[in-house]
Amino acid sequence: MRPTIVSTGVSVHGEFPVEHYRLAGLWCLHLYSYNAELRVEGKAHEVRPGSSSIVPPGVDLEYRFTGRSEHVYAHFRLPGIDSVPATALMRYWEPARFAALDQALREAVGWFAINPRRAEVRLWDVLWQVVDGDGSHTPTGVPQFGLDATRVDPVAHRLQSAIELRLAKRIRVGDLLATLDLGLSHNQMLRRFRQQTGSSILEYIRLRRVQRADYLLRCTSLPVKAVAAQVGVPDLQAFNKLIRRELGVSPRAWRESRRELPLDGA
């Protein structure tokens, strides 16, 4: 499932104080730099500089402008979502976050006429960020529009990202936590990580190392010793012990038994 852009650009309004829209089959993403009121199926939402909205297809929209009003928009199809609430997902962003979103969507606008696929990739990233949130204010009970079945804790996500970037190296949990300036105690970060992943950080690191080793053993010709180094366990004896414990056989036996199988999900 990915968006197919039908139209995207910078739109200027305000010549008419009230405008009505209804787009059949098209989703709407808007990033606003002005004050106005948006009514979605009659329900009023505040529009202010640094806000965004996503509206599903076939919804009655009414804008009430207070002067010249310029926003960046994308109208797109999103297959695979059959039923969504007739409402808007409104978010209000910190200036730096909004500026980054605005720049990304403007890049999609710039690419659309030249390379629509590249524009759609950029839009896809913007949509995930908008749905994930972390704005300065997010109303409760907002619909996810099928884009985000599982909410991601930003603290756990930062830790997971840091682990992925260090997986080929030795990872000390204390050092890992100390490198992330999240404004939380180590115990708070550890608790939120477990709530998100269902495991401790050490358990998670071990799991990701085994998963990466599984991939490298099945799908590359790297020597076992090189695979061990790639997953941050350069001691071959320790690597053998890890694979035997988690997969039930030695790395070489695992490679021989699984070499011809496709990647999971392929």
Image: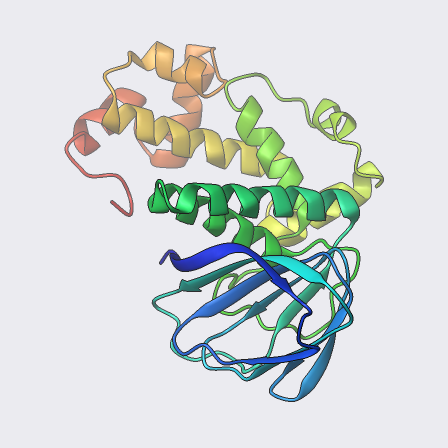
The image quadrant of residue 222 is top left
Residue 244 left/right relative to 185: left
Count of numbered tags: 0
Q: Is residue 224 visible?
A: yes
Taking the spot 33% from the left edge, 34% from the top edge, the residue there is: 248
Taking the spot 24% from the left edge, 44% from the top edge, the residue there is: 266
The image quadrant of residue 227 is top left
Q: Nearer the viewer, residue 241 or 177?
A: 177
Residue 94: x percent and y percent? Answer: 78, 50
Taking the spot 41% from the left edge, 49% from the top edge, the residue there is: 120
Q: Nearer the viewer, residue 139 or 23?
A: 23
Taking the spot 39% from the left edge, 71% from the top edge, the residue there is: 81
Residue 171: x percent and y percent? Answer: 62, 22
Q: Is residue 200 visible?
A: no
Q: Nearer the viewer, residue 201 or 107?
A: 107
Residue 201: x percent and y percent? Answer: 63, 37
Considering only vertical position in the picture, is 246 above or below 9?
Answer: above
Q: Nearer the viewer, residue 28 or 181?
A: 28
Residue 209 left/right relative to 87: left
Question: Hey, which residue is sitting farthest left in the picture?
Answer: 260
Residue 198: x percent and y percent? Answer: 59, 51
Considering only vertical position in the picture, is 115 above or below 78?
Answer: above
Considering only vertical position in the picture, is 153 above or below 189?
Answer: below
Residue 159 left/right relative to 243: right
